[in-house]
Image (cartoon, rainbow, N blue to C red):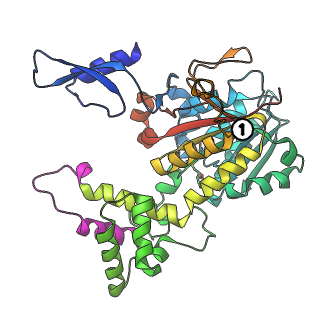
Amino acid sequence: MAEAVRLLSFARQGLYRLHSQRCYASCIDKKRPNAVKVKPMCVVTKRTRSGVEFDEELVGKYGSDRGHVPVMLKEVLEVLGSDPGRPLRSFVDCTVGAAGHSSAIIQAHPELQLYIGLDVDPVAHEQAQRCIGLLLNKDSSGKISDLRVYNLLKNFRDIKSALIGVDEQLSINGVDGILMDLGMSSMQVNNPTRGFSLGSDGPLDMRMDPQAALKAEDILNSWPEAEVGRILRDYGEENNWRLLQTRIAEARFSGGLYTTRDLVNLVQRSSPKRAGHIPKWRQGWIKTATRVFQALRIAVNDELNTLKDSLYDCFDCLSPGGRLAVISFHSLEDRIVKQTFLDLIAVDNELGNGERVSLLSQHDNGCIQAWVKQKVHGRNGIILTKRPITPTNEEVQMNRRSRSAKLRVIQKVGNN
Ligand SMILES: C[S@@+](CC[C@H](N)C(=O)[O-])C[C@H]1O[C@@H](n2cnc3c(N)ncnc32)[C@H](O)[C@@H]1O
């Protein structure tokens, strides 16, 4: 019903755009005979718009004054906590950031006995320690005072050694829940000295871990020209990569590129001029620059390889029945999560498709988990989100950063 209302208002506003992933029957609008009025016939979306009600108060409580607003917070709470048959006794936040998700999870789960937060960024690490420390101090109910808390300045690629460092038994028993909220925090983007933002001038750094050796300026000024092009093509999915590669190589003859402003100016000069007045947000070079920055950030932090390897390790670290939830922010990340999840659960090809994919909301341990729409079953586990969950329209309006977020969840096979 809600979807029908949304589509109707969509059509009324004159937005008669066909969504490529939906099947529509068309009919003629009498007032606008040339327009194709959309009418859903069968909906085959490749994502599931979150069905939870957006809770601005909850997001405000765990986000606003920390400098970062946690994305899909209510959805994350639901996917990690909606199974009453399996209490969340141990939880690892691989990307603790400003501890928005972590704080909410700790407060929502008085049964939690072990919390481990990882972040590779010392600024985030300190902030998370402070936030979680405050949370524990404020706990007058005594509900969470027994919680063992470990905030570690570590890359999530080292999750296995991190867990063994905390408690050797964890490598055998595993943990009940793991969260990865990928990408950058607002604290990182808003700090010009980190070099992540094309909106303000700063050094071309882009390291999540300031101890790491490689900076964006190293790639731009000294990597083989063809490698620079490959990064722009593969990690930025930028069509104009050849020209940009040449311009970046040419810039080396006049001293090189050292600031975000240098790079933005180069992109602007290399982008075709468009006739007429174009609003700033529609100018092509901004999109190109965004893609170039994304490409460099991925390369500097080796993000895609780290993600892929870490997904396997995180799955290994789950207890039987434990869940791993991953929020990604661009298609390259999401593709890796989707494909790796399929590989991890080991889909049994001998089962028919009907047995591998179950369509209806599931009745698990006596509880309807409404967010589970379609599952994929495998020998090692279940993908609980055949299609990723995306934020509500209200959340996207409140927090633009959430607009590209996709949440996928996998559950390790249980003991029973
Ligand atoms: C989107 S923010 C997380 C925000 C957090 N969920 C919250 O609610 O405040 C992503 C965080 O992950 C960290 N990060 C990125 N890659 C990492 C990695 N490979 N290992 C550990 N932390 C990483 C970043 O430093 C950043 O602080």
Does residue 272 appear in the picture of this structure? yes
The quarter of the image holding the N terminus is top left
Q: Which stretch appears magenta?
A: 259-283
Residue 241 point in image, percent of width and height: 33, 66
Query: Is residue 266 a member of the stretch shown in magenta?
Result: yes
* Residue annotated with mark 1: 135
Relative to 287, is 258 above or below?
A: below
The quarter of the image holding the C terminus is top right
**Residue closest to the eye, 203 or 332:** 332
Which residue: 55% across, 57% down?
A: 304
Residue 306 point in image, percent of width and height: 62, 58
Residue 252 point in image, percent of width and height: 36, 83
Q: Is residue 144 left or right of residue 408?
A: right
Q: Residue furthest right?
A: 169
Residue 144 point in image, percent of width and height: 80, 33
The image quarter containing residue 38 is top left
Residue type (three-letter) at the residue carrying disc 1? Leu
| SS at badge 1 | helix
Relative to 388, is 358 above or below?
A: above
Relative to 191, is 353 above or below?
A: above
Query: Is residue 294 a member of the stretch shown in magenta?
Result: no
Which residue: 57% across, 63% down?
A: 302
**Residue closest to the eye, 313 or 88:** 313
